[in-house]
Image (tube, grey):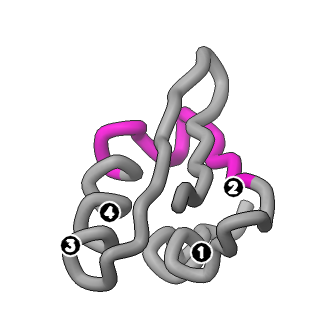
C-alpha cells in the first residue's frame, strides 16, 4: 500500500467535501490529530478527527 501525504490530504478537504479515512494500523490517530491541529494553527481551517476500531476519520468543519 502506498503511503498518503497526510498533511496535503487533510489540507485539501473542502467543508462540504466528505471525509478522509485512514487505516489504523498504518496511521495512528494521535499523529492524524496532531497534523490536523498544525493545519488549524497555520491556516485557521478546523477539523473533526474521530477514531474507530479500524480507521481514523477526518472531516472539515466550518
Q: Position of residue 24 (x, y in %)?
A: 56, 34
Residue to which mark 2 is pinned: 20
Of the image marks 1 and 4, the number of the one nearer the N terminus? 1
Query: Could you say which disc has been placed on residue 9 in the image?
Result: 1
Q: Position of residue 51 (x, y in %)?
A: 52, 27
Q: Which residues are magenta?
A: 19-31
Q: Position of residue 9 (x, y in %)?
A: 59, 75
In percent of the image, x 79 and y 57: which residue is there?
Answer: 18
CA gap between label 1 and label 2 equals 8 Å
- Taking the magenta stretch, the answer to whether it contains residue 7 is no
CA gap between label 4 and label 2 equals 13 Å
Query: Could you say which disc has been placed on residue 41 in the image?
Result: 3
Q: Residues within 10 Å of mark 1 (few under 14, many from 20)?
A: few
Residue to which mark 4 is pinned: 35
Q: Nearer the viewer, mark 1 or mark 3?
A: 3
As helix, strand or loop, the secondary structure at mark 4 comes to: helix
Query: Could you say which disc has been placed on residue 43 in the image?
Result: none
Of the image marks 1 and 3, the number of the one nearer the N terminus? 1
Q: Residues within 10 Å of mark 3 (few under 14, many from 20)?
A: few
- Left or right, residue 29 beside residue 37: right
CA gap between label 1 and label 3 equals 16 Å
Q: Position of residue 21 (x, y in %)?
A: 69, 47
**Proximity of marks 1 and 2: CB atoms separated by less than 8 Å:** yes
CA gap between label 3 and label 4 equals 10 Å
Q: Residues within 10 Å of mark 2 (few under 14, many from 20)?
A: some
Question: Vertical placement of 9 versus 51: above or below?
Answer: below
Q: Quadrant of the N terminus?
A: bottom right
In percent of the image, x 66 and y 67: which residue is there?
Answer: 15
- Left or right, residue 10 beside residue 54: left
Of the image marks 3 and 4, the number of the one nearer the N terminus? 4
Amino acid at each position: 500500500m502506498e503511503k498518503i501525504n497526510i498533511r496535503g490530504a487533510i489540507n485539501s478537504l473542502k467543508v462540504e467535501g466528505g471525509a478522509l479515512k485512514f487505516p489504523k494500523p498504518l496511521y495512528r490517530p494521535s499523529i492524524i490529530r496532531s497534523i490536523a491541529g498544525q493545519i488549524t494553527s497555520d491556516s485557521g481551517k478546523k477539523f473533526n478527527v474521530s477514531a474507530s476500531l479500524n480507521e481514523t476519520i477526518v472531516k472539515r468543519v466550518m
